[in-house]
Image (cartoon, grey):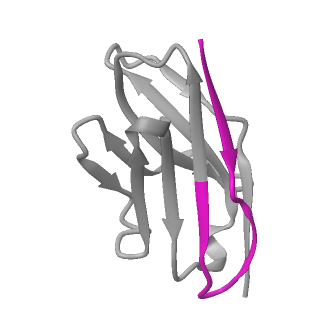
Amino acid sequence: QVQLVESGGGLAQSGGSLRLSCAASGSIYSIYSMGWYRQAPGKQRELVAAITSGDNTNYADSVKGRFIISRDNAQNTVYLQMNSLKPEDTAVYYCNLRRYNNYPYWGQGTQVTVSS
């Protein structure tokens, strides 16, 4: 099993910044990617950003140029630096770990609220 523990959510003003962290523990092997998804009220969960074991990154169009995903392999931790935040970034952010067999693991979620 894999445990994902998120931290760093909270309240920010429009134009501000927040940094999310997700630490993975447990059966850490055969990891294809780690990333972040978000879900706003009444909307489907969507990919925000992901980074593969080969350090390839993928971003949602809505966050390109504002968010940066990175990882510390030694600490099994993935980060999401969120800059120039907008009210529409308000959502619960979920950490995701995906194995090469595509099996996903999810964190418990952390709330990000951006005020205008």
- Taking the image as shown, residue 115 lies to the left or right of residue 70, namely right
Residue at 71 percent of width and 60 percent of height:
9
Q: Main secondary structure of the magenta part?
A: strand
**The C terminus sits in image quarter:** bottom right
**The N terminus sits in image quarter:** top right
The answer to whether 42 is drawn above or below residue 109 in the figure is below
The answer to whether 24 is drawn above or below residue 111 in the figure is above
Q: Quadrant of residue 19?
A: bottom right
> In the rendering, at what x and y percent does residue 96 appear?
52, 35
> In the rendering, at what x and y percent does residue 14 appear?
65, 86
> In the rendering, at what x and y percent does residue 42 appear?
72, 52
Residue at 42 percent of width and 45 percent of height:
72
Residue at 72 percent of width and 36 percent of height:
108
Residue at 62 percent of width and 43 percent of height:
94
Q: Observer-nearest residue: 108 or 23?
A: 23
Farthest-out residue, front: 74
> In the rendering, at what x and y percent does residue 58 appear?
31, 52
Specify the segment rendered in magenta: 1-20
